[in-house]
Amino acid sequence: ETGVTQSPTHLIKTRGQQVTLRCSSQSGHNTVSWYQQALGQGPQFIFQYYREEENGRGNFPPRFSGLQFPNYSSELNVNALELDDSALYLCASSLRGGEQFFGPGTRLTVL
Amino acid sequence: AQKITQTQPGMFVQEKEAVTLDCTYDTSDQSYGLFWYKQPSSGEMIFLIYQGSYDEQNATEGRYSLNFQKARKSANLVISASQLGDSAMYFCAMREGIISNTGNQFYFGTGTSLTVIP
């Protein structure tokens, strides 16, 4: 059974740029959730995708967008990057409502 | 109001001793799930234990047990026989509502940093 994978591991961008983060869900899981974890904080829910449709969204602006593909992998896109977007971005896959299994995260630094 | 509150920013425990990490939650839903995750310095969140709101027995998984007190809205994690590898951040999380609802968001607390002393 393959676990949740994320790419890239680390990323450095400058303010105003755009970034795409990728996540492959665990085999058999149909739901992917994305979280932002700032340094010293708990993860904050960005949004969730279930069967290729957005299935809930946290308090994040529209410049945070996502996609889920037929194989249940997912992308998180962030436009017009701001310094405060610097964080660890975690992807989690699950069967709907079940325990979430997290990937190793992508650490984004915005300069 | 915070959905999940963890009041212990840092905890120390002697190796082989037991430790309790506190978690209180706030929800008006009757159906919800409570989770604990471990986050080592590498960053990956590791699922430890789950308690459903209708479960009458406290959940146990190996050295981990969840002290679920529904009336007090608390879901404390107990780690028995602490090991050096238990040193990490620990997060309590909650999923509200019935699974079939849309948007099964997890709410996380701010975490507790546990250090196991040899």
Image: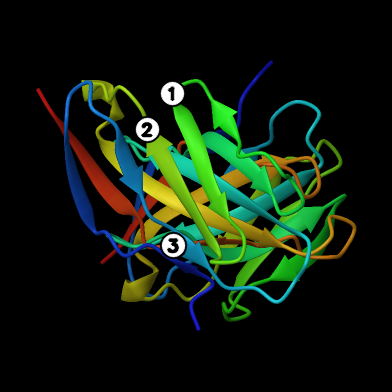
Residue B69, picture quadrant: bottom right
Q: Nearer the viewer, mark 3 or mark 2?
A: 2
- Residue beneath label 2, please? B79
Q: Earlier in the sequence, mark 3 or mark 2?
A: 2
Give coordinates of residue B44: x percent, y percent: 43, 37
The amino acid on which the numbered mark 1 sits, given as a three-letter code, is Arg
Tell me the colour scheme of the image: rainbow
Give coordinates of residue B85: x percent, y percent: 27, 23
- Residue beneath label 1, please? B63
Q: Which mark is residue B109?
A: 3
Q: Residue at x 34, y 62 (%)?
A: A41
The amino acid on which the numbered mark 2 sits, given as a three-letter code, is Ile
Vertical position of residue A32 compared to residue B7: above or below: above
**Label 2 element class:** strand
Closer to the camera, B18 or A54?
A: B18
**Dot 1 falls on which chain?**
B
Q: Residue at x 51, y 34 (%)?
A: B48
Q: Is residue A66 left or right of residue B65?
A: right
Q: Which mark is residue B10?
A: none
Q: Nearer the viewer, mark 3 or mark 1?
A: 1
**Dot 3 falls on which chain?**
B
Q: Are marks 2 and 1 in contact (CB under 8 Å)?
A: yes
